[in-house]
Amino acid sequence: MQDEFSLLEAQQLIHELIAQRAPLERTLDAIANWLNMVLPDATVAFMRYEPRRCTLSLLPSHRFSTFYTKRLQDVPVAPGVASFGTAAFERRLVVSENIATDPRWEALREAALAEGLRSCWSSPVMTADGALLGTFGTYYPTPRKPTPEGRRWLQRAAAMIALAMLRDNDIREHRSLSEWHRSLFVNHPDGVYEFDLEGYIQRCNAAFERITGYPEAELIGRHYNELVYPAYRQLTREGFATARRGEAITYETRGTHAGQFVYDLEVTNFPVTIDGEIAGVYGVCRDITERKRQIEDLRLLKRGFDASPNGMLMVDARRPDMPIVFVNPTFTIMTGYPTDEVMGKNCRFLQGPETDPTAIAEIRAGIAEQRDVEVTLRNYRRDGTPFWNHLIVSPVFDEEDRCTHFIGIQQDITRQKEQDAQIAYQATHDLLTGLPNRTSFTNRLEASFHQCQQQQAVMAVMYLDLDGFKPINEGLGHHVGNQVLVAVAQRLKALLGDNDSLSRLVGDEFGILLLDYDNSAVVKALAKRMLDALAQPFEVDGQLVQLSVSIGIACNCLSPEQPHELMQHADLALQQAKRQGRNTWQWYRGRRVESTRHSVLMRHDLHAALKEDQFELHYQPLVDAASGRIRSVEALVRWHHPRRGMVSPGEFIPLAEHTGQIIPLGRWVLRQACQEMAELQARDGRALPVAVNISSLQFHRDGFLDEVRHILATTGLSPELLELEVTESVLLDGAEPVIELMEMLKTMGVRVALDDFGTGFSSLSYLRDLPTHKVKLDRSFVQKTLTDRRTAAIVQGVITIAHHMDMVVVAEGIETPEEQEDMVRRECDLLQGFLFARPLPLAALRQLPDCLPEPRS
């Protein structure tokens, strides 16, 4: 009776613990004690099932060691996994009579035997509908198997364990839900509060305290309308009444803060229903004062945008193609595009065939750097008509200093540009004939003169004066004379090529600039055609008018030092033509005989110099602008004439270009430079890159690439140490083959630099097209930078553009510390000039230190 009574007491204790919601560990411990009463010598183990991972884990207990408890964590529920994993999988009692021999215990056998366990009976713990909760097992220190009575006790234990685990799961779930609800209520960023059915506050969270300015103690028991601005109380009552009827509602109202100021609120009310009855009302609110202010600011800003006389648009900088998100009415009027056609598009649809790529590049650079950009470019309306757009693009940053948008302000300056163009046209053109005037002709003459000097090209000037024009103008009237001048201009234009320039200088005098002609015979033939054309009568107002023309011709073959000398020579030739009876042409000869004889002798000597090895190379260093460290050298050819001594390159290089001897001379310079630099590296261990000037004739010659390969191979110089310097003249016959050749050189490792940059007409386009890594500023620019503001602006612009294109910039002709300091300030990369070193023979070059901090003579 005592045993039965003890069993009943133990069983009663278990049910009381379950009913009292005691901790699961305590309840399971009571069940284990009860099982020990009916199954002596048994050690009871409880394992919880984890559905998401489909595993079992042993619950901690004083009956097992820490090692064994850790070993039996996250054991898979599967057949053949000990007795408990198999029992859970098969939903039945599984008996391992002898753990030492049971194959199901292979993975855990060592741990179980170390724990002193020899037998294990495992039972699944399941709900009434068959859901698995876990397992419990009885371990024994000796091998054994359960009796029929023992099996019945195990079934009873499984039922009690299932009840305890279900109750524990319910408690845990309820606690979790309660904590979720509490956390949502307390931590919600918006104000959360509860009303009773009369509208009195029952509780609230910290956010509601912050919004209203009152502590919770002062809010509990107050009616909501005490916190509402009087003018909005009726609206708030209607919202509360809607929630009391069982509907959720969101509305805007205004509150009175504890600090006695009014603020805007967005409120959501919804009913709290318990057992089908509305028991109260929940409220959620947020302070929208700042949001409404921002909305009002945006409305005001939009009204300003809409009223602006300038076109305005905004693009989203956070999206890849930067789509348009806003345009004002002026934009649609200016461009002809309705709003619905532009929203979501990139504004590049305004561009067209004559839109300046430089302006587009500047806009893209400003966007990439998130800075203001101001450009003027040609855009196109929806109907295809162009207009000039003065555009300002500015970034828009958020409170975290991130660029979120760009705003563009457009101004149609087409009429202003047309007026400017008209003024510029009138300043540079003769209004009667439409030809360029004397100012324009002089500017073109100066530019062409300097370009031809650099490229060793030939140019000619023709000075025309009409014979017999004065009697026509005075006798027949100025209107007839004007018509004759217009007709003369038309006849002359018809005889000229595209590269020739015709200008009306003054009165009945005309000037013609001829470029790119082969020989003097071409010019003479043109002069003869002009005489014939103007000798034909002109019909004006029904009457025939006869006149002739005298022409003076001069070219740069006599090496004039200044461009105006050409016009002086042409004028002298014109006077000679008039002295010879007019209606003829004369070519300014000057010291023609001596010049011709000198050229013939020099050509012979140059040929002999190539055979007799009279040339040598000097090297001028290129130094780092900031540190003065030598980075490379430029190879410069020198001629030791056996009788005349040192001959200036400015004398024999043009002759070599003109006679074609520049090809063998250039080949010798290239080979000699590579050979001497390779020897310098081998003997002194000094690897200096060397730059070699390449004539456009040599560069375009068939086989030049193979010639470079052969020289590098035979001299042993690394291609990375060779740099070829070319001028813009290499592009005169077309860009595509030049770019292709440069790319092939680049593939070999040989770099190409652009020499004498800034002196040609198309410098920027060449800079864009040529795959070159280095740009050399011509010394004529460098020497004027300190004294000429426009020159300084050009130099700074070239440096900036080159750096944006990942190019190195070299300033040539640095002769004073002031020039050096100016170039350093402008962030020029390399400097070259007499300030650091004059061109030196190889032996003297070897004595130079690596760094040139002091000027050298």
Image (spheres, rainbow, N blue to C red):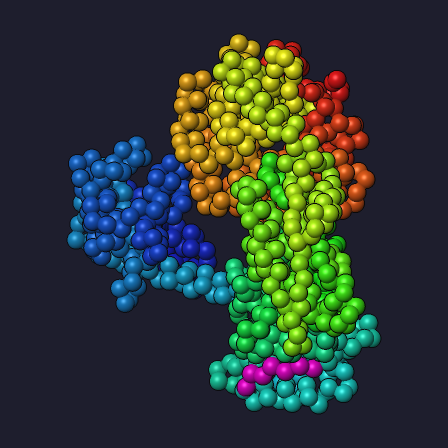
User: Which x, y percent locates residue 780?
Assistant: 71, 36
Residue beneath the point at 23% across and 45% down:
81
Of 13 and 734, the residue lying toward us: 734
Instruction: Tell me if 545 is positioned left or right of 91 in this view.
Output: right
- Where does the C terminus fall, quadrant-wise? top right
Instruction: Tell me if 6 is positioned left or right of 19 in this view.
Output: left
**113 over 423 or under it: above or below:** above
Residue 669 seen anywhere in this rendered image of the structure: no
Q: Quadrant of residue 92?
A: bottom left
Q: Quadrant of residue 406?
A: bottom right
Residue beneath the point at 42% across and 52% down:
25
Of 551 and 237, the residue lying toward us: 551
Question: What's drawn in magenta, residue-wise?
Answer: 247-253
**431 over 782 or under it: above or below:** below
Main secondary structure found in the magenta portion: strand
Residue beneath the point at 53% across and 63% down:
353
Of 709 and 74, the residue lying toward us: 709
Instruction: Tell me if 126 is positioned left or right of 435 in this view.
Output: left
Of 838 and 640, the residue lying toward us: 640
User: Which x, y percent locates residue 527?
Assistant: 60, 51
Report if residue 833 lies within the magenta region. no
User: Which x, y percent locates residue 263?
Assistant: 75, 76
User: Which x, y percent locates residue 790?
Assistant: 76, 46
Instruction: Tell me if 61 is positioned left or right of 273 in this view.
Output: left
